[in-house]
Image (cartoon, coloured by chain):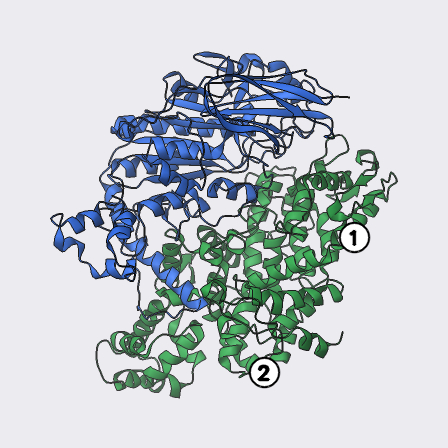
Chain colours: A green, B blue
Amino acid sequence: MDRREFFTLKRRAKATSPKPYAGLRQIYSGLAPYAGAWTEKEVIHLLKRTMFGAKRADIEHFKNMSLSQAVDELLNVPTSLPAPPVKNYDNSDIDAADADLTVAPGTTWVNTISKDFTANSRRMNSLKAWWIGNMINQDRSIREKMILFWHNHWTTESLMYDEIGTYGYRYHSLLCESALGNFKKLVKDMTLNVAMLRYLNGYLNTYTAPDENYARELQELFTLGKENNPNYTEDDVMTAARVLTGWRIKPEDESVYFKPQDHDKNSKTFSSFYNGTVIAGRSDATGGEAELDDLINMIFAKSVEVSEFIVKKLYTWFVYYTIGPDTITNVIKPLAQQFRDSGWEIKPVLATLLKSEHFFDANSQGCLIKSPLDMIVGLIREFDVAMPPSSDYVNYYNMLEFLHNQSVLMQQNIGDPPGVSGWPAYYQLPQFYEMWINHDTMPKRERFIDQLITTGYMRDNVKLIIDPVTFTKNSFPRALARDPNLLINAIVEVLYRVPISDASKARIKTQILLSGQVQDYYWTDEWDRLYDVPGDAVTYNTVYTRLRDLYKYLMNLAEYQLA
Amino acid sequence: MKRRDFFKQTLPASVTLPALLNGFSVKAFTGASPLVQALMGTATDTDKVLVLIQLNGGNDGLNMVIPIDIYRDYYNARSNIAIPQNKILPLNGTSKTGLHPSMTGVQTLFNENKVAIVQAVGYDKPNFSHFRATDIWMSASDSEQVLYTGWVGRYLNLEFPNFPHGYPTAQMPDPLAIQIGSVASLASQGSFPMAMTISDPTSIYDFNNVGDPVPSTPWGKELEYIRMIMGQTEAYGNVIRAAAARVTSQGSYPSNNDLAQQLRIVARLVKGGLKTRVYMVSTGGFDTHSSQVDTADTTIGTHAKLMARVSDAIKCFMDDLKGLGVDDRVIGMTFSEFGRRIKSNGSFGTDHGAAAPVIVFGKHVRGGIIGTNPTISSNARLNDNVPYQYDFRSIYASLLRQWFCVSDTDLKTVMLKDFPNIPLCINAACGATGIDDVRNDGEQLIINYPNPFVERTTITFNTKGGHTMVQVLDTMGRVIRVLTDRIYTSGTYTVTFDGYGLPLGVYYARFQNGATQQVRPMLKTR
């Protein structure tokens, strides 16, 4: 089917639901390419969903392209891995005989296996900090958002694999390399990934003591989902576990290998859901991989179930969690079809979705509650908060660790999601994203914002703080920023995805930028003086405090939590 | 009269609830007007508190509450992790059942008649996924039914209709329920999240709000939600901080026990005077697929630490409640999304299983062991599971009825069906609950003959009268037959189980007569 045919066939298959879905989201648009206005607003929507925050420079970069070019650039992810995490920790309490001691400070530890618990625990902290650093320093691509997507999908918890740093790094590398790759290939690679093998007990799964942990999640969480009717059976879980017996981890080099003696060599018969598929038992050295291929082929033969499950997950990640009957017909099903037709390639599916009129529908915008990392990393990026250079690795990692700890407080511990199903915000009905926000996490978000915009976070004389004056000068032309009305409009446009009323803007202007005065020129005069009398401390201070209070106020409002 | 009954009787159909309530200044009428009394006197007046302790990951019930009377079968099924018989903690009044050696705290409470252990709690067609099984326990749904509300949420919705609109009120100035931690659970989900989630009762935050109206769009919905949480945090935050401030000294709790630390906050807030009805706490690490015991000594290791954590926490909490003089007001229960397999695996662990015991504790609990030890076949197979004796929803229903005085009609609204009450606790305010003592310990109420059987077997049961049901379950815990389900007069009866065409293996006959429930294993052979 060619592209045009594909769109015309599936367009606007409406009238599946006589009443609006859940009385809330009446959305009928489908996957036809979006042809509406392409202004800063749309650029910001695209960037906030596919990257961490919309940086001023990125907005400028993309708004001069067409939507299609912009999406293509975002999907053109680098093929190389980022520079690996380095040893930012000291040697205290690490076994003197452990190989970690051969790693020089500031160089990478990823090529040196350590058996020491303390060293590994520090390596995992290094990896987590580095991971957040990658997000902050992301290039203009969707890769970091997709790595996080896959981490939430192919969950592993480092605490469950004893925080072995090299396991964590190999897991992250696989997510990074496969971020926009082939999903079916990723299923196989992930099944045999050392961290996953350890996390879901695949390495303990033997003929005499089958362990069904991975076999279950492979079907329930990773490929088919639990809501199909009919679906795989309990017996299928146990049978799949038998297929997967015999994979081990070699402690010396942490390599994954197949041990035929531990493998169940009998044939495995599956239920009618899989049409009674029989996977022939193998006993030779290549048997494990051959049976794994058979298993994956059998699961992927349920192609509608697999494709729709993955597409819905992508949709929930990038668009919204309400998937009404019209969205199923107009978006999910045709995207799933495209996914199957492309041989399980992720990139074309994302291209279609992100260029679609559905993605730019008013009912798809502004409704995503930021995850903790989205909020934290987005704030650092959007305000261009100065970080130590990565070459100053001690201070660089110190700052990243602070950000990581903040994210943990807000319930997103990267590398250690709360369970094998990932973060509840992406699966827990009926609340979904709302799960991020509660009486405990909301004050923590606000306190983080307050700290970054007021006192800053300081460690070893290095400070992480928003500079509101520099940010404003760099983001907006002088002529705009000297007009308090235009300035507030412009700031709200970047920080918020939802409008606030003119009355509120007027109140904010009067109370904050004008300190209760009514004449706009009080602000204009101060702003001009900042340029005309450089170095004047009083002026700088006047402008600084007002802008600081303005940004703080705007970030403290509920509106700031939406993307 | 309940609020909804009142409206049903007096209001013209066209008046909607929120509009009316928002239009009223309830304070201005204070008690005098019958209308206000009706409006105010909605929720049941009670100072009782329920504490739910979630053990996250699926607790191995068979190593927590250990069947001594069938020790040999227990040992054979899990020799690499079995607790040595001489290390099992004995319990007063029974020689058949004992506790994990780390659970000295719960042992003491049991012997003081402050603990009830309900055996083999689960449900038909158990689900083995953490995710789904947790939802089932939280929502109190059937195995295959998906509910988006929790049982606590539905109860609080019934008592406090229209929440959160107009709350806090004069009558209910406090949070309806409090979840200690940073994650809200499905259990407290009503038409809105009914619980307040906090980790530090002494800290509050003042939020900003421009208050622009929100449109009825997806982003409007999310914005309204965030604002609601901000507003509640501020309003209830002050109340909670004030309650916490009223309690300046408490009993001691181990600092390295996260569950104890959470319960410490609960005790403080209860003593501090909150009218909050339900508290939820949780602790994790129970998914013991591997290394659940030390390979050299099965009484120590991961699961032993978990059992000590739970037992010590409950003991400190009970001691503190007593010291604070609020032990009359509180009962609690533990639960986990499932138990684990009867047979252990090769990695000194256990895989996801089915039914498991539940511990109910409190000064006014009816102490003792409810139900019989699970049956373990003499050569347990890999996939053998503990079939359920008690539906977990019977426990919820019993607590709502016997602790919160929820009427039978309302119970059905909350629990969605009828579940037999089990005598768990005593709250004089609820009046007679009409529950007899359970006839269980020792008396065999259901047998079958022949056993093993080839095709058919005759099941004989002894009912004390009233509603009686006999089901047959397979080893996966699924109900495959209902042999009888009706009202009987007291006496002994027989029914026949025809297993023609069914696979060979173990089946369980489950007998249910009011609170009395027993399970009998039956073996189908060639």
Kind of residue sitting beneath label 1: Asn
In the image, B388 versus A370, the foreground residue is: B388
Q: Chain of mark 2?
A: A
Q: Is residue B465 left or right of residue A262?
A: left
Q: Secondary structure at mark 1?
A: helix
CB within 8 Å, label 1 to label 2: no
Q: Position of residue B469 (x, y in %)?
A: 53, 27
Q: Quadrant of residue B329?
A: top left
Q: Is residue A456 visible?
A: no
> Gap in Å between the C-alphas at discs 1 and 2?
39 Å
Q: Considering only order in the chain, which callout, 2 or 1, is on the residue closer to the N terminus? A: 2
Q: Position of residue B205 (x, y in %)?
A: 31, 55
Q: Give the vertical position of B88 relative to A446 (above or below).
A: above
The quadrant in which the N terminus of chain B is found is top left
Kind of residue sitting beneath label 2: Ala
In the image, A256 versus A456, the foreground residue is: A256
Q: Quadrant of residue B421?
A: top left
Q: Are marks 1 and 2 on the same chain?
A: yes
Q: Secondary structure at mark 2?
A: loop
Q: Give the vertical position of B6 relative to A361 (above or below).
A: above
Identify the residue position indicated by label 1 in the image.
A297
The quadrant in which the C terminus of chain B is found is top right
Identify the residue position indicated by label 2 in the image.
A35
